[in-house]
Structure formats: C-alpha cells, structure tokens
Amino acid sequence: MNALALPPAAKARSFADPYGWLLTLLAAAAAVMLMPWTVSSGYVAIGCLLAGLASWFATRAGAFKSDSTIAGTVCVISLLLVIFVVYPIGRMLLAAFVDERGQWVVGNALARFFNQDVWGVGCVTGQVRCGVAINSLVLAILAGLGSTLFGFALALLAERGGQRFRQGLRVLSILPVVTPPFVIGLAIIILFGRTGVVTQLLSDLFAIPRSRWIYGLPGVLLAQVICFTPLSFLLISGAVRLVSPTLEEAGQVLRGSRWHVFRTVTWPLVRPAIANAFLLGFVESLADFANPLVLSGNFEVLSTKIFFAIAGAQHDASRAAILALTLLLLTVGVFALQQRWLGKASYTSVGGKGDSGFAAPLPNGVKWGAIALVLPWTLLTVICYGIILLGGVVKDIGRFDLTPSLAHFATGFGIDWGVRGLVFTGSAWDSLFTTLGVATVAAPVTTALGVLAGYVVSRHVFKGRRSFEFLTMVNFAVPGTVIGVAYIVAFNVPPLEFTGTFAIIVLCLTFRNMPVGVRATVAALSQLDRSLDEASSTLRASTSRTFLRVILPLLRPAIIASLVFSFTHAITAVSAVIFLATARHNMATVYIAGRVEIGEYALAIAYSSVLMVIMLACVLMIQRFVGSAELGRRALVSA
C-alpha cells in the first residue's frame, strides 16, 4: 500500500471528520484571541473564516485527497503566514523604494543603498572607517569562523575525548538557552573595560596604560564567539556522534594512520555540520543586537544602525528599510554559498544495519590542539558567568567593591505592604510581568502551529506542498532586526494596525520562532514509520484522530524542544521586540537595554540573573509537565 494514500473508507469518512473542522476553528480562534478586538483583528477573523470556507470547497473538489483536517490546517496556517510573514517583509522591501508621500524613488533608493556609509572600504584604503555593511560582513565572518572552530574543538573532546570532558561540556552547552542578552557583553566590560578588573590588575602590576581597546571589533567579536560557540558545539557534536565507527575502522584496517583516517573519513562526514555551524554563527552575528549595542563603540554594524534609524533623532523609516534589505541580502547570500560548498554529495554514514564498531581515537595533535582551544574559552566563559551571578549581590562589581548588598534587587524587584495589600514597588516588575505573559501566550501557540505545519509537511502530499514548507521556513533566514522593522512598517497603518499593542509582540515572536517547531516535528516524524498512520487508517480512524491519538503522544520530544525554545527566546529576544515594545508593554530585554545605556550595569546584571533562574525553572517545569516519549518494553510490575 502507498504510505501516503488513505484507504477508500478513510477517504469517504475524512470529509465528515468533525475533528478536522474543530482543528480548523481552534487555529482560527487562537489567531484572533491573541489580539484585542479592533477593526484590524476583525479583518483577521474574517480572513480565517474565508480560509476555512476555502478549505471546505477544496475538499468538495477532491483537493487534499478530500481530507478536511489537512485542508483546513493548510489553508488557515497559510493565511496566517501570508499576513504575518510575507506581508510585513513585502511592505518593508517596498518601503525602501517609496518616500513618505508615497512616491516611487527608485533612483534615490539605489543611491542610498550603494552609499559609502553602507559599502565603503575606507578602512582598507587608509581612511577612518568602512561602511556599515562591510563592518557587519567582516564581523559575521570572523564570528562564524571563531565559533565554529571552538565548537568543533568542544565537540571532538566531548565525543572522542573521554567521559571526563563530556559532562562539563554538556553543562556549558545549555547556558546560551537561559542566557539573557547583554550578559556576556556586560561581563566583558567589567573585566576588560577602562576601569575593569583585569585592566586595573595589568595597570597596577605591569604599568600597562588603560585603554578602550575592548570597545569596537575586538570586544564585539569576543562576546559573540563566547555566546555562539555552545550553539556550534550542539550542532557539530551530533554529527561527530553519528559518524559510523565501521568506516573509521575500515580506514585503520587499511593501515591508515589516525591523522589520515581523521582527515579522509571523519572530516568529510562532518562537513555539513561544520557548514551549518558557520551559517548559524554568521546569521546570529548579523542579527545580534545586544553585544554591538554594548561594545561596538564607533564600530557601526547593521543591526544597531537600523535601530537608531528608527528610534533615533533621524527617524528615517526608508533608510531603516534599505539597511534591513542589505542585512537580508547578506543572510540569503551566505545560505546560497553554503549550499554550493556542500554540493550534492552524500554524507550518509548510518544505514539500516547495526554498527558495532568503536569510534577511532583522536590523533594526538588534534586532541592537544582541541584542548589548547577549549581551555581558555572555558575559563573565560566560567569567569563571565561567575561575574554575572556575583554582580547582583555585591555593591559594585564594576569597581570590584565586593561588599554584600541586595540593593540592586530591591531597586528592581522591591515589594512593600500598603493599604491595599501587597505592592510591587520595584521598577522592573512591569516589564517582567509583560515578558512572562508574552512568553506564556506565544510558546504554546508557536508550538501548536509548528507541530501542525510539520505534520502536514512530513506526512502528506498535496499541490503546493513545497511552497507551504517554504512559507513556514522564511523567518528562519530573516534576522530579527529585519522582522522588527518589517512589523513596524506593515502594522503601523490600517487595515492591520497593531503597533503599540500586546498582540504585535506575541505575533512577532510566534511566527519568528515557528520554524524551530516545524523542523523539530519533521525530524521527529522521520523516525516514526509511516506504517503507524496506515494501521490507524485501516482501523477506520480519521486523520485528526490518528494525529491526536497515535502521532502526537510520540512527538513529545519535539513538543518539549519547541516549547523550551519558544519560551526562552520569547524572554531573551531583543533585536525584534525592541522596535515593538512600548511604555505600557515593555519587555525585560528592553528594560535591561535601557539600564545599560544609562550605565546602571549592576541593576542590569541583577535582572539578568533573575531571568536566568526563571528560565531554568520554567524549562524544568515544561519537561516535567509534557513528559517524554517512552519506546520499548515496559518493566514488569511485580504483584
């Protein structure tokens, strides 16, 4: 039987499937309930109803194999993606070529795009500085190379260096998940700033004059390499673990040295992971807003330049759109180069047969080289996080005044008992409540849309499937700064006017993080045999019942991954939401950014440590609540 075909009985029954229409209505209702009832949300509600009606006609015409569940899911999610992904990006691109009066200014836009402030190479020819695009490109390349190099070294030691390295490195790998922005940048300033701890020691012991060398390319690069290395480690370690030991043993049997086997067998098989790690570091560097804001000094990059074009005194939306277009082109360009480097070669090393071999040991030179790279990175990372944890409970970590004090927590999170009862007097409470509210709403919605879209893409074939999959993944390649500008441009005027509301932040984060849920679901479903779907359909179960009763319980790892990612990124997001937050709906990261700008580093550090504790607790709660998928035989229960 064709794995993608339904039995005739199931086909006839799928049109009257009540669960299919229920899923459609729930998806439409969830999209509408996120927004306050305004004329704009009314348009979205009407659009969802029209999408449901279109799915009804499509099933009547035989599309989607007359499956109402798939038809409704595809139509509603496609509409939402067009409204909240395609439309904002399109409006942003259009704004680059239209002035404030609505007139086309293509020539002026092109002149601004190719301006020396953007693409100038003055730093190479001896002038003062390069253009902002050149600065961003150089920084992204260096950050991608550095994080990939350190991540590869960490992965080799964790997977091939013995158990003594593995546990400690695993702990370090989870830190970026629960680390708010600005944390590493603040720690570097406290260490290496003009009045930093290390700077003072070098000045007192070796009479090295104080300087501002950390503000610029060196400081931003150092912070980004520390931040992005664990992400590269997570990508590369999985690939190193899946390299077939049999292939490496075959190389050794043919009398190849350790270095020869590593160079000709191991390295080629981890090339895709290396490329993906570099791509991740490159894109994250381009989209990074927090570290350049703290450390860039006179070294301008696109992310901060876009922010000041919108929020600064100039308030030039057209210039922000042109800079965002430049950032988008750089990101898409590196995607294309990555695909060209990997080519169409096969990198499969794990087949259907069991693999009982032992992984080849690392060559001595590679092992000691990896240790030489990992030790300074580990030491600096531990010191940075130690400073953050210590900085909130001492008087002034910046001046190395270690007198115990909780004054910073009292300023941000003070509580008093007034006439009406408990009063939250701290200045950070409002932003914390808003952030937790946004994360609580956005995480389950993001996961639901991601799991549904991933299931449809992975398990069903229909016309337009590739286009639907592309729509779900568009935001993965778009930096957060570009998304923020796009939402400001698109939803600041009728017919869809959401700027300044709680809803626009939730919507931005929902569709920004949705691709992770899609890919996690697709990856999980690739390990589930399609015979499960066939067996359920043979037993006259509808598509929705099969999904809810058979597939969904086995997707718990993907659900956990999507919930954790969506929740933590909703709390730590800054590059997109900094354009959308307002005084009424302020976010924790925006509050921290404000404290950093006015030099209140201690309060920013105290707030960051509170967020880290909250995220760790929430991650553990999500894992306990959702549970895990259990495969294999159950243990016998004694009488």
Image (cartoon, helix red, strand yellow):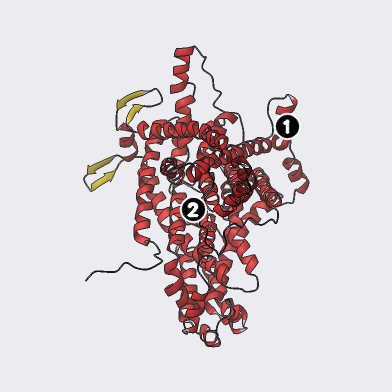
Where is residue 219 shown, x and y percent of the image? 55, 30
Where is residue 385 shown, x and y percent of the image? 41, 35
Outermost residue toward the top in this view: 207
Asked if residue 360 is positioned above or below residue 150 in the image, the reply reads below
The three-letter amino acid code for the residue at tag 2 is: Ile
Asked if residue 393 is positioned above or below residue 471 in the image, the reply reads above
Badge 1, how many Cα within 10 Å: few under 14, some, many 20+?
some
**Left or right side of 420 for 292:** right
Where is residue 67 shown, x and y percent of the image? 55, 80
Of residues 582 and 370, the one nearer the viewer is 370
Badge 2, how many Cα within 10 Å: few under 14, some, many 20+?
many
Q: Which residue is mark 1?
A: 121
Of residues 332 and 337, the one nearer the viewer is 337
Whether residue 228 is visible, yes or no, is no
Numbered disc in front, either 2 or 1 = 1
- What residue is shown at x 54% (from left), y 49% (from top)? 240
The three-letter amino acid code for the residue at tag 1 is: Val
SS for dot 1: loop
**Left or right side of 375 for 495:** right
Q: Quadrant of residue 200?
A: top left
Q: Which residue is mark 2?
A: 505
Q: Earlier in the sequence, mark 2 or mark 1?
A: 1
Where is residue 414 shown, x and y percent of the image? 29, 39
